[in-house]
Image (cartoon, rainbow, N blue to C red):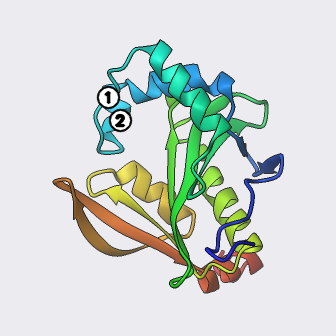
Amino acid sequence: MKRNNQPSEGPPGMIAGSKVRLRAKKLSDAPNDYRWQTDPDLVRLDATLPLTMPYSRYLMEYSGELHCPNPTRRFLGVETIDGEHIGNCVYYNGDRDKSEVELGIMIGNRDYWDAGYGADAVVTLVDYLFARTNLKRIYLKTLQWNQRAQKCFQKSGFTACGQVIKNGHDFLLMEIRRPQWEEKRTGACR
């Protein structure tokens, strides 16, 4: 493990949950990612604007990021057990002094909304991070009005811990701490 409390490498192979697998991003993800990042309704969930660059330029930048990834951010593809790419997740903003990292997720394929795929991806990533690091806390931000996301995160063991305003958007700050995760893993919270 690196000193910044992030695994020294990306996940080996795939990390399996009960409904999803998390895996390294690959070039074949680019068409879905581009479609999702240009969809006004989807990017609104991340409080961002749709991409406007042409796909050819996006593909070139995407390929460059795959070959030279940012060492402070780990992007993972979320796929069904059958191998269909349905979304992405990321962990970033690792803080060595606080032993914490931020998590993000987006299920871009609407056919998989409200069926537990997002919650399974979150739980799978949280389990991976806590099991392989000495992190004490994993946190995330979700828009105040995004009840679907909040329900997913609560189902995954996260609890509200504050609010933050960023770029004019109101976010709910949520967290899960190692003791909560350990209780959940042993069944004490079920």
Expressed as whole percent of the image width and height from the top left, the position of residue 131 reads 76, 72
Query: Which disc, if any, is residue 50?
Result: 1
Q: Is residue 172 left or right of residue 8?
A: left
Task: Give amino acid for label 1.
Answer: Pro
Q: Nearer the viewer, residue 14 or 174?
A: 14
Determine the CA span between mark 1 and mark 2. Answer: 6 Å
Q: Amino acid at mark 2?
A: Val
Does 110 sit left or right of 10 as displayed?
Answer: left
- Residue 111 shows up from this direction: no
Q: Nearer the viewer, residue 7 or 144?
A: 7
Which tag is nearer the camera, tag 1 or tag 2?
A: 1
Residue 97 visible (yes or no): yes
Mark 2 Cα within 10 Å, few/some/many (few <14, many 20+)? some
Query: Residue at coordinates 61% horizontally, 45% vertically from top-left?
Result: 69
Q: Position of residue 1 (x, y in %)?
A: 75, 72
Residue behind mark 2: 43
Name, please, the residue furthest toward the right.
Answer: 13
Q: Are dots 1 and 2 in contact, CB under 8 Å?
A: yes
User: Residue 7: x and y, percent?
Assistant: 71, 65
Q: Residue at x 73, y 78 (%)?
A: 187
Which residue does the image show at 70% across and 28% down from the upper left? 84
In the picture shown, does residue 107 fall above or below 183?
above
Local secondary structure at mark 1: loop
The number of discs equals 2
Q: Residue 137 occupies which quadrant of the picture?
A: bottom right
Residue at 76% x, 50% y: name it: 18
